């Protein structure tokens, strides 16, 4: 009896240890993973759309995937969210960092704990397994400039706007746009040289636009990196009666930019589908958790639209998934 009792006790202990050991067997030999995705702002329609993709992935795979983030775009609050999740010992962490440099120590700690880390909108991050983008940042920035130059008839002064001067992707887009303008559109002039920081806030973009128009009365264009920049500028353009004289182009989505697409102050906005970006991050995380990191190389098809043939440079991956939204096609992109 003693021997049988010891065998039974040992079996119980093994079951308990297996249950506490991170990834679990979901039945039929399939592991289940807990993967958290941390975004910049849980009130932003952009990231609510990303959450849709994460939840779709969770339903399709059975993995425990969810989205967390601060209630506003605030780096300190986002870091607190990351710290809490890392302390829980999740299997993987996908993150869209507000300030990539500030997140590096935390990502290092997470990986040291065995957590897989995937980032998005953060090229150049070191302490991640991979950073994935919907497209090459240089190409996206150049294409944004093409759209603005077209609206401005390739003539006049323009302003560049970013969420934060620490936002790596935003600055890469604007730097590429400016370089493209200097090479291809000599009739355009950048004023001022410094990018305008609008803190991912439409009201602030609106106020900054009014300030710039007052300071530089010959302005004819605004190029914005944040999804709130072109709509914020569009609101000011419409209010000041400058429609048809000044245009705002850049990153945004229909749910924010629709009134200004209709009025014409936003002749076009560009984006990628954040729901697909969320799925792409999760696909990568699962591949690594499944021990398939060696398969992540140039040409990889993640089975996600826009990510069917990835480019790779070190730990940087990119697809070909940007969209151009106009008044004529915005009904196709209702997010």
Image (cartoon, rainbow, N blue to C red):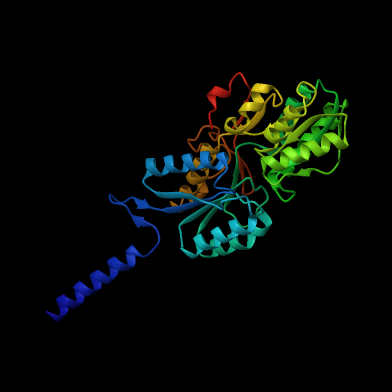
Count of picture labels: 0
Residue farthest toward the left in the current orientation of the protein: 1
Which residue is at 88% across, 27% downward?
186
Question: In the image, is 134 to the left or to the right of 145?
Answer: left
Measured as percent of width and height from the top left, residue 104 is found at 64, 59
**Residue 323 at least partly seen:** yes
Asked whether 156 or 33 is in front, the reply is 156
Give whichever of 226, 4 is nearer the camera: 226
153 horizontally vs 22: left or right = right
Q: Looking at the image, is 29 positioned above or below residue 152?
A: below
Q: Residue at x 73, y 29 (%)?
A: 239
In the image, is residue 220 above or below residue 85?
Answer: above
* Quadrant the N terminus occupies: bottom left
- Choose between 232 and 144: the one closer to the eye: 232
Please state the horizontal and vertical placement of residue 150, each as a whole percent of the image. 76, 22
Question: Viewer-proximal residue, 11 or 91?
Answer: 91
Q: Is residue 173 visible?
A: no
Q: Residue furthest bottom?
A: 2
Tell me: 328 left or right of 34: right
Return the x and y of residue 306 as percentages of the image width and height. 55, 32
Residue at the location (67% across, 54% down)?
99
Rendered-image quadrant of the C terminus:
top right
Image coordinates for residue 48, horizontal then vertical, percent = 52, 41
In the rendered image, the vertical position of residue 308 relative to residue 58, given as above or below: above
Specify the farthest residue to the top: 328
> Which residue is at a point 41% across and 53% down the rendered structure image?
33
């Amino acid at each position: 009896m003693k021997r049988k009792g010891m065998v039974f006790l040992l079996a119980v202990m093994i079951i308990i240890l297996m249950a506490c050991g991170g990834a679990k067997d979901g039945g039929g030999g399939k592991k289940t993973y807990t993967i958290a995705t941390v975004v910049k702002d849980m009130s932003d329609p952009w990231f609510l759309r990303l959450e849709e993709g994460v939840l779709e992935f969770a339903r399709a795979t059975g993995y425990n995937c969810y989205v967390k983030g601060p209630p506003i775009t605030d780096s300190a609050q986002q870091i607190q969210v990351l710290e809490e999740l890392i302390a829980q010992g999740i299997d993987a962490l996908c993150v869209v960092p507000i300030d990539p440099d500030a997140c590096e120590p935390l990502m290092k700690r997470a990986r040291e704990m065995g957590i897989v880390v995937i980032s998005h909108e953060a090229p150049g991050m070191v302490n991640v397994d991979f950073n994935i983008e919907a497209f090459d940042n240089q190409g996206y920035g150049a294409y944004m400039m093409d759209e603005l130059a077209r609206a401005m008839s390739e003539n006049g002064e323009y302003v560049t706007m970013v969420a934060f001067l620490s936002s790596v992707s935003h600055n890469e887009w604007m730097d590429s746009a400016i370089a493209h303008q200097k090479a291809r559109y000599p009739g355009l002039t950048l004023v001022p040289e410094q990018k305008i920081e609008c803190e991912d806030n439409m009201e602030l973009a609106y106020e900054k636009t009014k300030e710039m128009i007052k300071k530089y009365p010959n302005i004819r264009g605004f190029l914005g990196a944040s999804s709130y920049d072109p709509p914020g500028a569009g609101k000011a353009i419409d209010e000041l009666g400058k429609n048809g004289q000044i245009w705002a182009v850049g990153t945004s989505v229909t749910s924010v930019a629709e009134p200004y697409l209709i009025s014409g102050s936003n002749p076009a906005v560009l984006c990628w589908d954040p729901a697909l970006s969320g799925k792409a991050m999760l696909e990568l995380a699962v591949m690594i958790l499944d021990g398939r990191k060696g398969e992540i190389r140039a040409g990889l098809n993640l089975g996600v639209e826009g990510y069917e043939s990835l480019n790779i440079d070190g730990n940087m991956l990119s697809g070909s998934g940007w969209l151009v939204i106009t008044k004529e096609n915005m009904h196709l992109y209702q997010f």
